[in-house]
Structure formats: C-alpha cells, structure tokens
Image: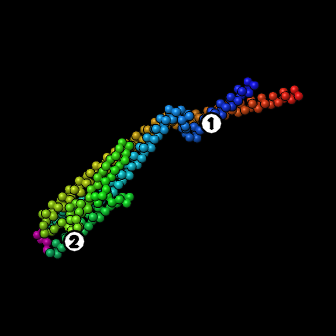
Amino acid sequence: MSFAVNTLSTLNRTQSAMNTSIQKIATGSQYPSASYGAAAYSILVNMYSNIGTLDQSNSNTQTANAMLATASGGVSSTVEALGSLQQTLQQAANGTNNASDLQDLSKTVNQTLSQINENASIQFNGKNLLDGSQSLTVAGDNGYTKVDLGNMTTQGLGLTDQNGNSKIDLSNISGSLQTVTDAYNKALDQATSLGAAQQNLSYASANYTTQQENLTAAASTSGDTDIAAEVTKLKSADTQNQLALYATKMNMHNNAAVLALLR
C-alpha cells in the first residue's frame, strides 16, 4: 500500500513539473500567471504595461512629427513666396517700369498671393493645418505637449482683407513693402516655432525609444524563460514520470500474480 501511495505521489509531482515546464516554454515567461509567483507576476505585468505606454507615446510623437513636417513644408513655401513678393515690389519701385511692366508685376503679385493660400490649404489626415483652425496636442507618457499652428492664409498674414481683397498696392510701394515684411516675419516666426517643436519631438522620440529598450531588457531578464533549462527540467520530469508509470505497472502485475496464486 505504501509503495502505491509513494508511486502515485511521484506521478503527481512529475506531471505537475512537466506541466509547469511546458507552460513556461510555450509562453516564454517564467510567470505565465500569478500562480507562479504573485509578486513577481505583478511586477512583470506592470513593466510590460509601461512598455506598451512608452511604445504608444513614441508612436504618437512620431506621427505628430510627421504632421509638423507637413505643416513646416507649407510654411517654408510661404516664406519663400513672401521673399519673392518683396523682390517683386522692389522691382515695381524702379522708375524704369512702364504701364505694361506694372500690369505684369501686378499679375505676379496676385499669383503669389494665390500660391500662399494654396500653401495654407495643406492637409494631414484630412485636417487643414495652416488656416488657423488647428493646434496639435501630442499625448505622451509624461503628459501633453501643445503646438500652435498659425493662420498662414493671405488674410491671416495681413496681405488681404476679410473679403479677400489684396492690400498690396503697386502705387504705394512703401506701405505694401511694410505689409509684406510684417507677413514675412510672421511666417518666419511660425517656421522657426515648428522647427523647434519638431526638434523637441525628435528628442522625445529618442528618449522613449531608450526607455522602452531598457525596460524591455529589464523585463526580459526578470521574466523570460531559460528555454534550455526548462527543456532539461521537462526531460528529467518526463523520465521520472515514465519510471513511476513503469513501477506502477509492475506493482499491479505482481499484485495480480499474487492474487492468482491465492485462488
């Protein structure tokens, strides 16, 4: 009777050891559930949760940076257009121009204003970026970062009135140049603000990546299964299990033989 009890105990122990090793190998984790160590499991789950948060923060930052890069491209084109407009006005101020020349220059002014409005209509994911309707909020691990996107339309830059009429008058070059210069400075300020915001987001992305890598390494060290060691344990437990089964079978055979003799 004692032999049978000991054999059954061995079978239960080896089967449990086999099941444990199989689950650890299958999941790749030392702690597939809280039953393998409640404190260690809780710490590991929190670590992986933080890794997920960092990963999403990094993704948010990179997407926001792509959006700002799109906006920055539009603003840079506007800065270039305003510089060209300044040159056009300086050309118009030259006393050698005849009526036909001034008419052509006036067309150039209107074309430039049209180009500026086209730049301001740039979109990202269906959102207008430079018409004054947007500000960008970036959700990160440490809170929120807000980036203001200004109104880069001709009206927003003070180049046209609320009805869309041009304020650039070739008969008043001095006043028109001041209007364009003010617009140029405003657009340049927006360009530098976007550049600074992009740089900050790039730094944030790099920091998130470093934190994620370090935390992933720590979680791996704490929780990853040593596959080779678990395979060895599994083989050992399986061998013991086979021996216990064999012993049980032999014991049952011997008992049957004794009962046959008694009959």
Q: Is residue 96 magenta?
A: yes
Residue 192, horizontal then vertical, whole percent: 25, 52
Q: Quadrant of the C terminus?
A: top right
Residue 242, horizontal then vertical, whole percent: 70, 33
Q: Amino acid at mark 2?
A: Lys
Residue interval drawn in magenta: 94-98
List the residue tagged with mark 1: 19
Residue 233, horizontal then vertical, whole percent: 61, 32
Q: Could you say whether the residue bearing mark 1 is in a helix, strand or loop?
A: helix
Residue 137, horizontal then vertical, whole percent: 34, 50
Q: Amino acid at mark 1?
A: Asn
The structure residue drawn at horizontal position 56% and vertical position 34%, both measured from the top left corner, is 35
Query: Does 247 sit above or below residue 167?
Result: above
Q: Nearer the viewer, residue 186 or 36?
A: 36
List the residue tagged with mark 2: 107
Q: Is residue 224 magenta?
A: no
The structure residue drawn at horizontal position 39% and vertical position 46%, both measured from the top left corner, is 57
Residue at the extreme right = 263
Residue at the extreme top = 2
Dominant secondary structure of the residues highlighted in magenta in the image: loop
Q: Nearer the viewer, residue 25 or 156?
A: 156
Q: Nearer the viewer, mark 1 or mark 2?
A: 1
> Does any portion of residue 80 appear in the rendered image?
no
